[in-house]
Image (tube, rainbow, N blue to C red):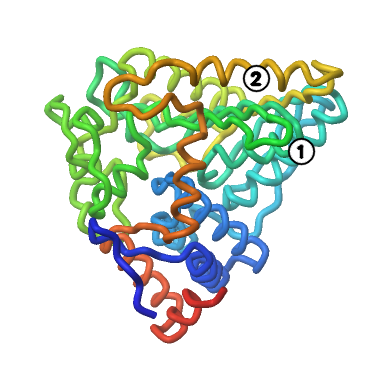
Amino acid sequence: MSLAHDKQGNVLVPATGMINLAREIFNRAGCNPEEADTIATRLTGANLRGHDSHGVIRIPRYVAWIGEGRQVPNQTIDVVQDSGSIVILDGKFGFGQSIGEQAVDVGIERAKTHGVAVVGLRHAGHLGRIGDWSERAAAENIVSIHMVNVRGSLIVAPFGGVSKRMSTSPISAGIPVTGETPIILDMATSTVAEGKALVALKGGKALPGDAIIDGDGKLTSNPVPLYGDSATSTNPAAGDGDGALTTFGAHKGSGLNFLMEMMAGALTGSGCAGGVDEPEKRRFCNGMFSIYLDLKVFHSDDSFVAEVKNYVAFLKSSVPASGCDAVLIPGEKEQMVMADRQAHGLPMAVDAWNDIVATAAGQGIDQDALESLLSKA
């Protein structure tokens, strides 16, 4: 199967074919069929929404992590503590795409029972696009907020510093709107997610000029200082270089990043990104602190949805600034990108696509099998 290319030279991979290929890779790497399908669907879903940083570019890294024991296939959550509306769960370093679903489903069920629920998830593998969890709750008419940290990931410099002391620490929230697409806020507290630096490193979209601070304290768009000598490998390791990601909004983003560490790392018991005088990095995992609110407890009628729609219309009535076509609400851009990519395919830099093909080959998927998977509806 000959894949098309866009005007920028990116490979255009059909979304369904990408799911088929990723599913086969993870199944062969040790994930059961259900988990392999979940991982493949969620990674591809991130690309469909324009979050390439949390999409299929992570396939080589995830497969490597299975071999290293950093992420463990086929895990189910353990309940550490249960007081009804507050639950602490342990993901046992399982794949975040499946562990995340399990944890969110607990939050949804408890919110429906108690009206409100708080779920602390510790020791999850990489949870992927955190907006997935806001969307999953919103589909059940549940408002949710998710705060995440990355233990053992020292790749972000705090405001006023050069040394790596933080992770990208994302936050997401979901607002259900009956009969319409939910409103989803999903963002890292670093200027860009690490995956966006990886995308840029592999020949994709360039970073903004203040995304990286190098070891000399100079701001740059070059991702190489973040990865150091590993920058040319199939699986570059963020943090191997002497550079770091910056936080967005200077001290404000740095403050929010700190809050994610407190809530998702310290409070859940998952652990913060790092600590003083530790000879080795902490084992990588995600912690997630989530709040779930059942709308029917707050409103017995449609007043919430009416107010949300009214405010959205008010916000979007703002006169667009120069260079902008319209004012967008959180999640709206993702929906626009998804419609385009469902029709035309997922654009991938050639280097990134070649790394996925090499990973597939490493799992015994030859060229004929690769083309069959990509072309299968």
Kind of residue at badge 1? Val
Q: Is mark 2 on a helix, strand or loop?
A: helix
The image position of residue 358, as x and y in percent, is 34, 72
Picture quarter containing residue 122?
A: top right
Picture quarter containing residue 255?
A: top left
Q: Is mark 1 on a helix, strand or loop?
A: helix
For the residues labelled 2 and 1, say whether their Cβ atoms are less than 8 Å apart.
Answer: no
Q: Where 301 sits versus 324, above or below?
A: above
The image position of residue 71, as x and y in percent, is 52, 54
Q: Nearest the camera: 213 or 300? A: 300
Dot 1, crowdedness within 10 Å: few (<14), some or many (≥20)?
some
Does the rendering let one see residue 269?
no
Q: Is residue 193 left or right of residue 39?
A: left
User: Which mark is on residue 308?
Assistant: 2
Residue farthest to the bottom, as pictured: 368
User: Which mark is on residue 106?
Assistant: 1
The residue under the point 43% across, 86% down is 368
Picture quarter containing residue 276?
A: top left
Q: Nearest the camera: 312 or 235? A: 312
Marks 2 and 1, how far apart at CA = 26 Å
Does the rendering let one see residue 63?
yes
Q: Nearest the camera: 254 or 318? A: 318
Q: Where 319 sits versus 75, above or below?
A: above
Q: In this view, does 30 lie to the left or right of 216?
A: right
The residue under the point 42% across, 60% down is 344
Kind of residue at badge 2? Val
